[in-house]
Image (spheres, helix red, strand yellow):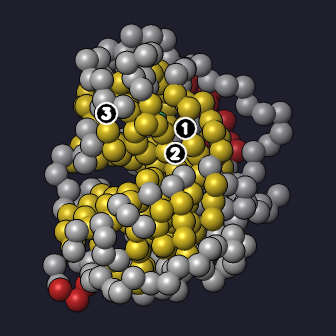
Amino acid sequence: MPAHAIGNYERMSVREADPTAEGIGQILEARDVALGRYTTVRRFLPARTRRLIGPWCFVDHFGPDDVTAGRGMWVPPHPHTGLQTVTWLLSGEVLHRDSLGSSQVVRPGQLNLMTAGRGIAHAEESVAGNDEALHGLQLWIALPPDARDGAPRFDHYADLPELVVDGSRVVVVLGEVAGLRSPATTFSPLVGAHIELGESPVVLPTDPGFEYGVLVVDGSVSVGGVLTHAGSLRYLPPGHQELRLAADGDATLFLVGGPPFETPLVMWWNFVGPDHESVAAARDDWAAGRRFGNVVGFDGAAMPAPTMPSVRLLARNRDGSSQG
Ligand code: MN
């Protein structure tokens, strides 16, 4: 890693955020959503007027949840199209099974990356015998038009590159940070990084063509000089050469970013597609047992396909607007 690529600076002055200020970026608060039967997640994306950050179209944060009292995570087989799913844990374990025959436990510091392409089904559940609190993220990446109908695949990365600078640690989960590149398979420019901040402020080089989101998982962090608390996601518009981060004590963050995604998308249930017809066809194929294959080994029935809304689904731009 080049020494100039990442560095620490004197502790910056910190101001409270104006959540509407464009220059310093907007704060996105999460809403609670039920996932499977026993897990509630905090969903940051899609938000009403910000559907994506780069190609990242879905950001869920869950836990820490006590898994000794109940079943923990228990998400029956369900289909996906047009996206990649990123499962990233901070503690606990999750077992992934999919219709390609994959069966993989993901642990903290490891990446489970599922590429749906034209269609895959998977199930996720807590691992029996593991009593650690379940805490993590599930993120979706919208596939670009030339990859959305590609073959499904599943990849597990147990070892990811990391930078350690002045007591802070940056794990490059996807894409590249400061010249260090993740081995993860991606289909458009993007970055995803897990950051543990120590006492010293850190400056990461950023791509001026990227927009970014900084999800504060734990602690309070000055993001570009603006205080951001745990449970908030700060959006940063394109145009910046660097990202200055300073924690008030220890803090854990997850950084997502990429060039603004210019393709309008329909997102409905577990499907991402270009239009109403593609999503309706995926829904009908799941209901009829076509296309997605079977998830073997899960002790329970697959998720039924919900009824399509009576109105036509609109492809939306990243700001929530639509042509129709
Ligand atoms: Mn899923």
Mark 2–mark 3 Cα distance, whole angstroms, equals: 16 Å
How many other residues sit within 10 Å of disc 3, few (<14), some (14-19) or many (≥20)? Answer: many
Q: CA distance from mark 1 to mark 3?
A: 15 Å
Q: Residues within 10 Å of mark 1 (few under 14, many from 20)?
A: many
Q: Name the mark nearer the viewer: 2 or 3.
A: 3
Amino acid under disc 3: Gly
Splitting the image into 4 quarters, where does residue 136 fall?
top left
Choose top left, top right, bottom left or bottom right for residue 170. Answer: bottom left
Observer able to see residue 56: no
Left-right relation of 25 to 5:
right
Say which amino acid is labelled 2.
Asp
Residue shown at the point (49%, 11%) measured from the top left? 301
- Residue type, mark 1 in image: Val
What kind of element bears circle 3?
A: loop
**Is 306 rendered above or below residue 140?**
above
Residue 188: x and y in percent read 41, 65
Q: Counting residues from the N terminus, which is met first, the one under dot 1 or under dot 3?
A: 1
Q: Which mark is residue 92?
A: 3
**20 left or right of 106 in image:** right
Q: Within 10 angstroms of label 2, few (less than 14), some, or many (20 or more) residues?
A: many
Residues under numbered marks 2 and 3 in contact, where contact means CB atoms less than 8 Å apart: no
Q: Nearer the viewer, residue 58 or 234?
A: 234
Label 1 sits on residue: 41
In the rendered structure, are the residues bearing label 2 and label 1 in contact, judged by CB atoms less than 8 Å apart?
yes
- Give the Cα separation between the discs numbered 2 and 1: 6 Å
- Residue 191's place in the image compared with 44, above or below, is below
Give the residue number, with chain letter if any, for mark 2.
Answer: 60
Q: Position of residue 147 (x, y in %)?
A: 43, 55
| Residue at 21 percent of width and 73 percent of height | 165
C-beta proximity under 8 Å, tags 1 and 3:
no
